[in-house]
Image: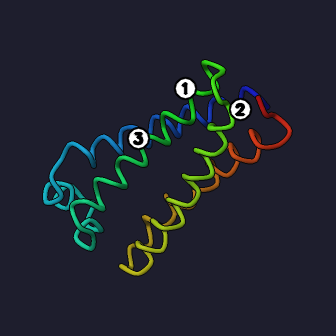
């Protein structure tokens, strides 16, 4: 189970690291043109903040456990991603972007799995 949790955490870290860096590095208009139409509903600052949270969560999923420094941050990062994915699903639902909700739900379940495992029976 520990290996499964590491694999899922690594996958989530890669997905959210890339997604967050993209939101931080590209202008909002370019993100919207690239298929992230939801950015039209948010300010530039909000999009950058979401990107920053995603990058921090990606780092939080891996680094604390890897280095043994404040390992409680790993399940907290996963729980934070659950909250981010709930917000994403609500946003996509309001916009009628139903295929995106399925992606949000999958990522939410994976993050919840890591949070459950690292808070509970497989804590560091």
What element does badge 1 sit on?
Answer: helix
Q: Is residue 109 above or below residue 5?
A: below
- How many numbered markers are drawn? 3
Of tags 2 and 3, the one toward the viewer is: 3
Left or right of 40 in this view: 91: right
Q: Is residue 112 above or below residue 121?
A: below
Q: Which residue is mark 1?
A: 63
Q: Residues within 10 Å of mark 2 (few under 14, many from 20)?
A: few
Residue found at x 36% / y 79%: 95
What element does badge 2 sit on?
Answer: helix
Residue found at x 23% / y 67%: 43
x and y percent of residue 24 in the render? 26, 45
Q: Which residue is mark 2?
A: 4
Of tags 1 and 2, the one toward the viewer is: 1
Q: Nearer the viewer, residue 96 or 47?
A: 47
Distance between the alpha carbons at the discs numbered 2 and 3:
22 Å
What element does badge 3 sit on?
Answer: helix
Residue found at x 63% / y 37%: 74
x and y percent of residue 22 in the render? 27, 44
Whichever of callouts 1 and 3 sits on the residue coming sooner in the sequence is 3
Q: Which residue is mark 3?
A: 55
Residue found at x 28% / y 53%: 48
Q: Residues within 10 Å of mark 1 (few under 14, many from 20)?
A: some
């Amino acid at each position: 189970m520990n290996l499964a949790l590491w694999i899922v955490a690594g996958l989530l870290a890669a997905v959210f690291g890339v997604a967050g860096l993209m939101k931080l590095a590209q202008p909002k208009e370019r993100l919207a043109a690239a298929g992230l139409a939801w950015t039209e509903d948010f300010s530039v600052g909000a999009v950058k903040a979401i990107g920053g949270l995603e990058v921090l969560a990606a780092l939080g999923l891996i680094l604390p456990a890897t280095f043994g420094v404040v390992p409680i941050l790993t399940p907290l990062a996963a729980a934070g991603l659950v909250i981010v994915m709930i917000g994403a699903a609500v946003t996509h639902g309001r916009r009628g972007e139903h295929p995106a909700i399925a992606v949000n739900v999958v990522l939410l379940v994976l993050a919840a799995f890591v949070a459950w495992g690292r808070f509970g029976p497989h804590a560091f």
